[in-house]
Amino acid sequence: MWGAEGRGVRGGEERWAVPEGAPCLRASPAFDRRCLLDENTFTENFMNQIRARKTYLCYKVEILDGDTWVPLDENKGFVHNKGANQPGQPCHAELYFLDRIRSWNLDRGLHYRLTCFISWTPCHTCAQNLATFLGENSHVSLRIFASRIYSLPGCGAGLRTLQAAGAQIAIMTSKEFEHCWETFVDHQGRPFQPWDDLEVVSQHLCEKLQAILQEGNLGFKNPQYTLMMKNLKVKLRKHSHLPLQQKE
C-alpha cells in the first residue's frame, strides 16, 4: 500500500505515473527528481509555526558497515497520510512507512538504521505499531525527528512506549530542516532559508518533548512562547498565503 499520488512531487520534463514517495532509484536526474517534494509542499507541512493538516514523513535508510553507517539511496523517499476527505480508507503516514519497510525484506543478518523526518509526532496507535515493529526486528533501529508535537490524549504514552522500544525521538532544529531541504526537496539549487523564530519554536518544542518523555507532562507551558506564537499567527495571517490548519 503506497501513499496517494499528489502535487507534492515534481519531475523532469515528463510526468511519470508512479506512487507518491516511491523509493528513489538511480536511473537519471529527471527520474531522481520525481522522488522529491516541491518547495511549497515542504514549507507548508514542515514549517513548525503552522498547524498543517497533513502528515509528511521523509525517510532514509543506512546500513552498518564496520563502524560506519552507509546510506542506501534506493531506500530513500517520503510518504504522507491519506485523510478522511480522500477516496479509500484513511491511513496515517507511519503505517504507509511500515508497509514500505516490510516490502524491503531487510536482511536480518545486517543492521539497519532508519531515520524519519516527520511533520507531526506519531499518534498513540502509530507509536504502538512502530514500537511493535522494533520489538520484532532487532536488526533495525529508528530515529525520529519531528517538526511538531501531536498532543491528543494518549499521544504522550505512545511516545514513551516507542522510546522504551529503542527509538530515538527528537525535535527538528535548523540542522534537520536544512538536511531535509537538501535531501528531499526539489530546491533547484536554492539554499534553505530559515523562517523567523525557527530555533525559538524548536527549542520550546524540544523542552516540551523532554517533559513528555521524562514526566508524561502534556501540559507543559511557557508563557513567553505562548505570547510569541500568538504574535506569529497574527503576522502569518497578514503576510502569508500559508493557512493555520489542524492535523487530520
Image (cartoon, rainbow, N blue to C red):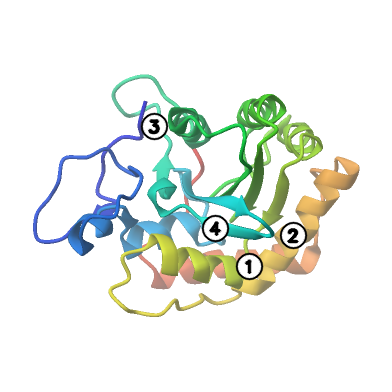
| Whole-number angstrom distance, CA of label 2 to CA of label 3 | 28 Å
Q: Earlier in the sequence, mark 1 or mark 2?
A: 1
Question: Residue 190's image quarter?
Answer: bottom left
Mark 4 lies on residue: 70
Mark toward the viewer: 2 or 4? 4
Is residue 65 visible from the viewing direction of this image?
yes
Relative to 140, say whether 24 is above or below.
Answer: below
| Whole-number angstrom distance, CA of label 3 to CA of label 1 | 27 Å
Residue 132 image label = none
Instruction: Please tell me which residue is depicted at 29% across the width and 55% down the height of the picture.
Output: 26
- Label 4 neighbourhood size at 10 Å, few (<14), some (14-19), many (20+)? some
Mark 2 lies on residue: 206
Amino acid under label 2? Answer: Cys
Q: Position of residue 69 (x, y in %)?
A: 61, 58
Q: Position of residue 198 (x, y in %)?
A: 59, 71
Instruction: Please tell me which residue is depicted at 33% across the width and 57% down the height of the picture.
Output: 36
Question: Residue 161's image quarter?
Answer: top right
